Image (spheres, helix red, strand yellow):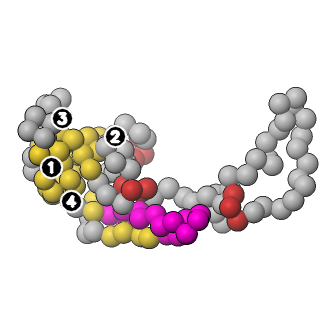
Amino acid sequence: MSVWHGDQHKRKLTGGKKRPYRKKRRFERGSFPTETLLGDPARKISRRRGGNVKVRVLSDKFACVTNPATGKTEKTEILRVVKNPANVDYDRRGVITKGAIIETSMGLARVTSRPGQNGVINAVLIGKE
Protein backbone atom coordinates (compact mmCIF):
# COMPACT_ATOMS: atom_id res chain seq x y z
CA MET A 1 0.00 0.00 0.00
CA SER A 2 1.44 3.34 -0.99
CA VAL A 3 0.72 6.92 -0.04
CA TRP A 4 -2.05 8.58 -2.06
CA HIS A 5 -2.01 12.30 -2.86
CA GLY A 6 -5.47 12.63 -4.37
CA ASP A 7 -8.03 15.11 -3.06
CA GLN A 8 -11.23 13.07 -3.28
CA HIS A 9 -11.18 12.23 0.41
CA LYS A 10 -11.33 15.93 1.36
CA ARG A 11 -14.39 18.12 1.76
CA LYS A 12 -15.51 21.07 -0.34
CA LEU A 13 -14.99 24.67 0.82
CA THR A 14 -18.69 24.76 1.69
CA GLY A 15 -18.30 21.74 3.94
CA GLY A 16 -20.12 19.34 1.64
CA LYS A 17 -18.77 15.90 0.79
CA LYS A 18 -16.96 15.20 -2.47
CA ARG A 19 -18.40 12.18 -4.23
CA PRO A 20 -15.86 10.03 -6.09
CA TYR A 21 -16.32 10.42 -9.83
CA ARG A 22 -13.40 8.09 -10.65
CA LYS A 23 -10.98 5.68 -9.02
CA LYS A 24 -7.41 6.36 -7.86
CA ARG A 25 -4.88 7.19 -10.54
CA ARG A 26 -1.26 6.13 -10.75
CA PHE A 27 0.00 9.73 -11.00
CA GLU A 28 -1.61 10.52 -7.63
CA ARG A 29 0.50 7.86 -5.96
CA GLY A 30 3.16 8.98 -3.49
CA SER A 31 5.93 7.18 -1.63
CA PHE A 32 7.04 6.63 1.91
CA PRO A 33 9.85 8.81 3.30
CA THR A 34 13.41 7.55 3.07
CA GLU A 35 14.96 7.51 6.52
CA THR A 36 18.70 7.86 5.88
CA LEU A 37 20.84 6.19 8.51
CA LEU A 38 24.54 6.09 9.33
CA GLY A 39 26.20 3.00 7.86
CA ASP A 40 27.66 1.43 4.74
CA PRO A 41 26.84 3.41 1.57
CA ALA A 42 23.53 2.24 0.06
CA ARG A 43 21.37 4.02 -2.48
CA LYS A 44 18.00 3.27 -4.08
CA ILE A 45 17.05 4.49 -7.55
CA SER A 46 13.36 4.93 -8.28
CA ARG A 47 11.62 6.01 -11.47
CA ARG A 48 9.50 9.10 -11.10
CA ARG A 49 6.92 10.80 -13.27
CA GLY A 50 8.03 11.80 -16.74
CA GLY A 51 10.75 9.15 -16.80
CA ASN A 52 12.83 11.07 -14.26
CA VAL A 53 15.04 9.25 -11.78
CA LYS A 54 15.25 9.93 -8.05
CA VAL A 55 18.25 8.71 -6.09
CA ARG A 56 17.60 8.06 -2.42
CA VAL A 57 20.34 7.59 0.18
CA LEU A 58 19.35 4.68 2.41
CA SER A 59 22.57 4.84 4.43
CA ASP A 60 25.97 6.49 4.12
CA LYS A 61 29.03 7.24 6.23
CA PHE A 62 30.45 10.16 4.22
CA ALA A 63 29.30 13.75 3.75
CA CYS A 64 30.52 16.66 1.60
CA VAL A 65 31.24 19.30 4.24
CA THR A 66 31.82 22.95 3.30
CA ASN A 67 33.80 25.31 5.50
CA PRO A 68 32.20 28.78 5.10
CA ALA A 69 35.34 30.54 6.36
CA THR A 70 37.60 29.13 3.63
CA GLY A 71 34.94 28.16 1.06
CA LYS A 72 36.48 24.70 0.63
CA THR A 73 34.46 21.49 0.49
CA GLU A 74 35.82 18.11 1.59
CA LYS A 75 34.41 14.60 1.69
CA THR A 76 34.59 13.63 5.35
CA GLU A 77 33.41 10.72 7.45
CA ILE A 78 30.30 11.13 9.60
CA LEU A 79 31.09 10.09 13.18
CA ARG A 80 27.59 10.37 14.66
CA VAL A 81 24.26 12.16 14.41
CA VAL A 82 24.21 14.74 17.21
CA LYS A 83 20.69 16.13 16.83
CA ASN A 84 17.75 16.11 14.44
CA PRO A 85 15.28 18.93 15.10
CA ALA A 86 12.85 17.65 12.46
CA ASN A 87 11.46 14.85 14.60
CA VAL A 88 12.01 13.60 18.15
CA ASP A 89 11.88 10.00 16.93
CA TYR A 90 14.46 10.73 14.20
CA ASP A 91 16.64 12.33 16.88
CA ARG A 92 16.53 9.15 18.98
CA ARG A 93 17.13 6.80 16.05
CA GLY A 94 19.84 8.92 14.38
CA VAL A 95 18.05 9.54 11.07
CA ILE A 96 19.76 12.08 8.78
CA THR A 97 17.45 14.65 7.17
CA LYS A 98 17.84 18.27 6.10
CA GLY A 99 18.71 20.39 9.15
CA ALA A 100 20.19 17.49 11.12
CA ILE A 101 23.40 18.25 13.01
CA ILE A 102 26.14 15.69 12.41
CA GLU A 103 29.59 15.29 13.91
CA THR A 104 32.35 14.91 11.33
CA SER A 105 36.12 14.77 11.51
CA MET A 106 36.12 18.51 10.62
CA GLY A 107 33.67 19.37 13.42
CA LEU A 108 29.92 19.88 13.83
CA ALA A 109 27.99 20.43 10.61
CA ARG A 110 24.37 21.05 9.60
CA VAL A 111 22.95 19.03 6.71
CA THR A 112 21.79 21.30 3.87
CA SER A 113 20.70 18.70 1.30
CA ARG A 114 17.75 16.32 1.37
CA PRO A 115 19.39 12.85 1.36
CA GLY A 116 16.13 11.01 0.70
CA GLN A 117 15.43 13.22 -2.34
CA ASN A 118 18.82 14.38 -3.71
CA GLY A 119 20.93 11.28 -3.24
CA VAL A 120 23.80 13.11 -1.52
CA ILE A 121 24.63 14.37 1.97
CA ASN A 122 25.90 17.97 1.87
CA ALA A 123 26.63 19.89 5.06
CA VAL A 124 28.01 23.23 6.26
CA LEU A 125 30.32 23.61 9.27
CA ILE A 126 28.78 25.41 12.22
CA GLY A 127 30.37 27.03 15.25
CA LYS A 128 30.58 25.32 18.61
CA GLU A 129 27.18 25.16 20.29
Question: Chief secondary structure of the magenta span?
Answer: strand
Image disc number at residue 126 = 3
Pinpoint residue 44: horizontal percent, then vertical percent. 42, 70
Neighbor class of circle 1 (other Cα within 10 Å; few <14, some 14-19, many 20+) is some
Disc 3 and disc 1: Cα gap in Å?
14 Å
Q: Nearer the viewer, mark 4 or mark 1?
A: 1
Image disc number at residue 73: 1
The answer to the question of whether label 3 and label 2 lie on touching residues, with beta carbons closer than 8 A, is no
Q: Is residue 48 left or right of residue 103?
A: right
Q: Given the image, on which type of amino acid does mark 3 rest?
A: Ile
Residue furthest front as drawn? 50
How far apart, in angstroms, are the residues tagged by discs 3 and 2? 12 Å
Q: Are marks 3 and 4 in contact (CB under 8 Å)?
A: no
Determine the residue positioned at 64% across, 63% down.
2
Amino acid on which the number 1 mark rests in the picture? Thr
Q: CA distance from mark 2 to mark 4?
A: 16 Å
Judge the density around disc 2: few (<14), some (14-19), many (≥20) Cα neighbours within 10 Å. Answer: some
Residue 99: numbered disc:
2
Q: Is residue 16 left or right of residue 76?
A: right
Instruction: Judge depth for marks 3 and 1 and give the one in front.
Output: 1
- Extent of the magenta region: 46-59
Residue picked out by circle 4: 62
**The one of 115 and 59 positioned closer to us in this rendering:** 115
**Residue drawn 27% across the image and 50% down it:** 122
Quadrant holding the C terminus: top left
Dot 3, how many residues are within 10 Å of its Cα: few (below 14), some (14-19), or many (20+)?
some
**Which is nearer the N-term, disc 3 or disc 2?**
2
Q: Earlier in the sequence, mark 2 or mark 1?
A: 1
Residue 92 showing in the rendered view: no
Q: Which element is circle 1 on?
A: strand
